[in-house]
Amino acid sequence: MLMSSDIPNVLIQQLRSWSQAGLSHLPKARYSQPRPGDHSISEVAAGNPSRSVATEIAASSSTGVAASTATGAHAVDFISSAEDNYAAAASSANVQTPPTSRVGSQGLLGGWQIGVTGSAIDVRPYPVSLRIDERQHQLGQLALQVAGCRRCAILSGCRTQTVFGVGNPQPRLVLFGEAPGAEEDQQGEPFVGAAGQLLNKIIQACQMRREDVYIMNTVKCRPPQNRNPNPDEMENCWEYAERQFEILQPEFICCLGKVAAQRLLKTEAAISRLRGRWFNYRGSRVMVTYHPAYLLRTPSAKKATWDDMKMLLKEMGIELPQA
Ligand code: SF4
């Protein structure tokens, strides 16, 4: 297990490896440095053993998430009374609150951050911000490029159409999911099926409209039988997602589910170890929560998801109406 005292050695090893690979310059981040309390993936790797959902709820309290059992009227459609009961039971469980003190360093070096497997997470600054008309134009051009993409033989061979992304070209928040499903493949828009309906409720509960945010996936073509995209497919498609982020330059990114979180943060850490923390991707503040499709299969996770969203709203300065 990686310990905090090992971090300097890890940095040295990473520098040597980059140097051997011919990298002589590390760009310096200028857009937004990580803030106090933001976590590096190394910290997650170093920190906690696997935690149950009940422990996660307790952990949320220690990281600034209000793990209240009162959900408020605004979340009535999103969280059923069954989940409230579950949360109350979890909150009263005899769980240990994990230590809050973590690695003092953010694990940062120039424009890069050490990942859990020794890989470098991208915290380089975004390019110069574009005007809204330029964003629309560039997103349109990129969508055309994606529509003709055939990098993944299987996915491009069985898709109805590509599913690029939709929403506000100048968003504060990007919701970053996994891959299109059957409905999305038919309609060409992300999150329009059952999981999309639930995501809409979550967005509304957060006092936002779907058109306020931007919604996109890790891969733009539907994997057959709704399987997870494989590593090659995610790598093939990453260039497009990366370019979308460069155009959108959101303040916040909410990763929906482990596929999106693990790809963006370059980690294999379980989602239960990524939730309740802030990360940095190129100046965007990144948090992780469950995928709406998982919530449909596991309604007991809705309460934890709502805690995640409250953590996000607090940072965004969005106040929830009183219950
Ligand atoms: S998933 Fe992405 S990279 Fe693969 S064929 Fe579709 S658009 Fe191209």
Image (tube, helix red, strand yellow):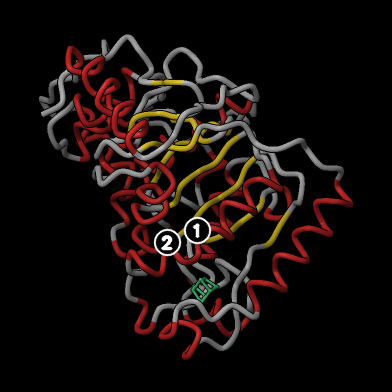
The residue singled out by tag 1 in the image is 238
Which of these two is toward me, 9 or 308? 9
Q: Quadrant of the C terminus?
A: top right
Which of these two is toward me, 76 or 105? 105
For mark 1, give the secondary structure.
helix
How far apart marks 2 and 1 lie (CA) works out to 5 Å
Residue at left 36%, top 26%? 40
Q: Is residue 280 left or right of residue 321?
A: left
The residue singled out by tag 2 in the image is 235
Q: Quadrant of the N terminus?
A: top left
Q: Is residue 195 left or right of residue 170?
A: left
The amino acid type, in three-letter code, at marker 2 is Glu
For mark 2, give the secondary structure.
helix
Q: Is residue 275 left or right of residue 322?
A: left
Which of these two is toward me, 218 or 211? 218
Residue at left 34%, top 30%? 114
